[in-house]
Image (cartoon, rainbow, N blue to C red):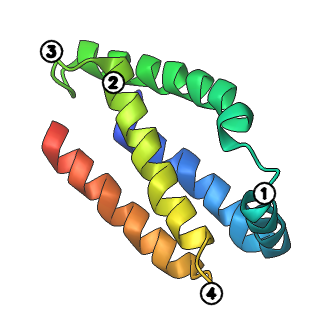
């Protein structure tokens, strides 16, 4: 049986989150790079974000066909909104003086629950 989109979304994010927790020095290096005056996030992330949106839109479309998500929801829009909000939640915490990875995990769990209850 196919994993529902929202669960797949959460599992994929948590894999990345677990990597971040295990490699906190990389998180700090990324934070330093993001705060640099030479960092241009739009150029760095635009292609990756487009690919991620297309990937998650395909998962959403599968759930639409199975009846888990309403068919009248634009899959690309939903994927984009979820990814943008996920990035906002994550990067807001990463840019704080003291990064609290546990708080990020709590916020992501709440974020997923909000979306899950709204689309089921």
Looking at marks 2 and 3 on the same chain, the residue that comes earlier in the sequence is marked by 3
Asked which quadrant contains residue 21, the reply is bottom right
Left/right placement of residue 110 relative to residue 106 reads left
Q: Residues within 10 Å of mark 4 (few under 14, many from 20)?
A: few
Q: Residues within 10 Å of mark 1 (few under 14, many from 20)?
A: few
Q: Nearer the viewer, mark 1 or mark 4?
A: 1
Residue reaching furthest bottom? Answer: 98
Q: Tell me where residue 15 appears, x and y as whole percent.
A: 63, 54
- Which residue is drawn at the image coordinates 84% and 67% (left, top)? 29
Which residue is the site of mark 1? 37
Left/right placement of residue 61 relative to residue 22 reads left
Q: Tell me where residue 44 appears, x and y as whole percent.
A: 74, 36
For label 1, the SS is loop
Asked which quadrant contains residue 74, the reply is top left
What's the mark number on residue 77?
A: 2
User: How many marks on residues?
Assistant: 4
Give how far apart the Cα atoms at labels 2 and 3 are: 11 Å
Residue reaching furthest front? Answer: 37
What's the mark number on residue 98?
A: 4
CB under 8 Å between callouts 3 and 4? no
Give how far apart the Cα atoms at labels 3 and 1 are: 42 Å
Asked which quadrant contains residue 69, the reply is top left
Q: Residues within 10 Å of mark 3 (few under 14, many from 20)?
A: few
* Most foreground residue, 95 or 8: 95
- Which residue is drawn at the image coordinates 33% and 19% (left, top)? 75
- Which residue is drawn at the image coordinates 78% and 74% (left, top)? 24
CB under 8 Å between callouts 2 and 3? no
For label 3, the SS is loop
Q: Nearer the viewer, mark 2 or mark 3?
A: 2
Is residue 30 among the parts visible in the rendering?
Answer: yes
Looking at marks 1 and 4 on the same chain, the residue that comes earlier in the sequence is marked by 1
Which residue is the site of mark 3? 72
């Amino acid at each position: 049986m196919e994993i529902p989109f929202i669960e797949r979304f959460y599992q994929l994010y948590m894999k990345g989150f677990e990597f971040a927790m295990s490699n906190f020095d990389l998180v700090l290096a990324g934070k330093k790079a993001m705060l640099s005056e030479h960092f241009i996030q739009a150029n760095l992330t635009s292609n990756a974000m487009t690919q991620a949106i297309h990937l998650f839109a395909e998962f959403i479309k599968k759930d639409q066909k199975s009846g888990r998500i309403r068919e009248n929801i634009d899959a690309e829009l939903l994927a984009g909104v979820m990814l943008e909000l996920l990035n906002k939640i994550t990067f807001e915490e990463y840019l704080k003086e003291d990064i609290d990875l546990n708080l990020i995990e709590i916020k992501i769990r709440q974020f997923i629950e909000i979306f899950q209850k709204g689309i089921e």
